[in-house]
Image: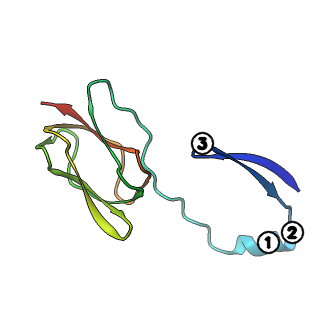
Amino acid sequence: MQNYKVTVNGKVYEVTVEETSQSAAATSSISSPAEKPITSKPGTAEAGDITVNSPLAGSIMSIKVKPGDEVKYGQVLLTLEALKMENEIVAPEAGVVKEIFTQTGAMVNVGDLLVSLRSL
């Protein structure tokens, strides 16, 4: 057995891993590999940028804007599926889309940076 410390979202967990026989390992390798989930790219907005963060953990269903687009206060920027509901994420104020930090299908957590805007 091997003991490891694993940090997930800032929390430290102690994990014990048990080595199995080769026949069990061969059996498990036959199953199809799990797909790696799509995640948002980490990023930070520059000073003075307007940031739009995820209010909920969920999956990005669609992105309605692209960098360079001028948006109005309350305009839908993207749609987030959380708790089996579609949630429209809107512009907190008028501006120009500077950068998008996520993509369709990405899993996001509460507080993840989604979009940065530049004031008009």
The picture places residue 25, in percent across and down from the top left corner, at: 80, 69
Residue underneath mark 3: 10
Tell me, for residue 22, which label it has, or none.
Answer: 2
Residue 7 placement, left or right of 28 = left
Check disc 2: other Cα within 10 Å, few if <14, some if 14-19, many if 20+. Answer: few
Instruction: Assign a secondary structure to mark 2.
Output: helix
Tell me, for residue 108, which label it has, or none.
Answer: none
On the image, which quarter does residue 78 sit in? bottom left
The residue located at (62%, 67%) in the rendering is 33
The residue located at (35%, 51%) in the rendering is 55
The residue located at (77%, 75%) in the rendering is 27
Gap between marks 1 and 3 measured at Cα: 34 Å
Is residue 17 shown above or below 23?
A: above
The amino acid on which the numbered mark 1 sits, given as a three-letter code, is Ala
Instruction: Assign a secondary structure to mark 1.
Output: helix
Earlier-in-chain disc, 1 versus 3: 3
Residue underneath mark 1: 26
Q: Quadrant of the C terminus?
A: top left
* Residues marked 2 and 1 touching at CB (< 8 Å): yes
The residue located at (13%, 44%) in the rendering is 73
The picture places residue 110, in percent across and down from the top left corner, at: 42, 50
Residue 115 placement, left or right of 65 = right
Which sits in the foreground, 16 or 39? 16
Gap between marks 2 and 1 measured at Cα: 6 Å
Gap between marks 2 and 3 measured at Cα: 34 Å
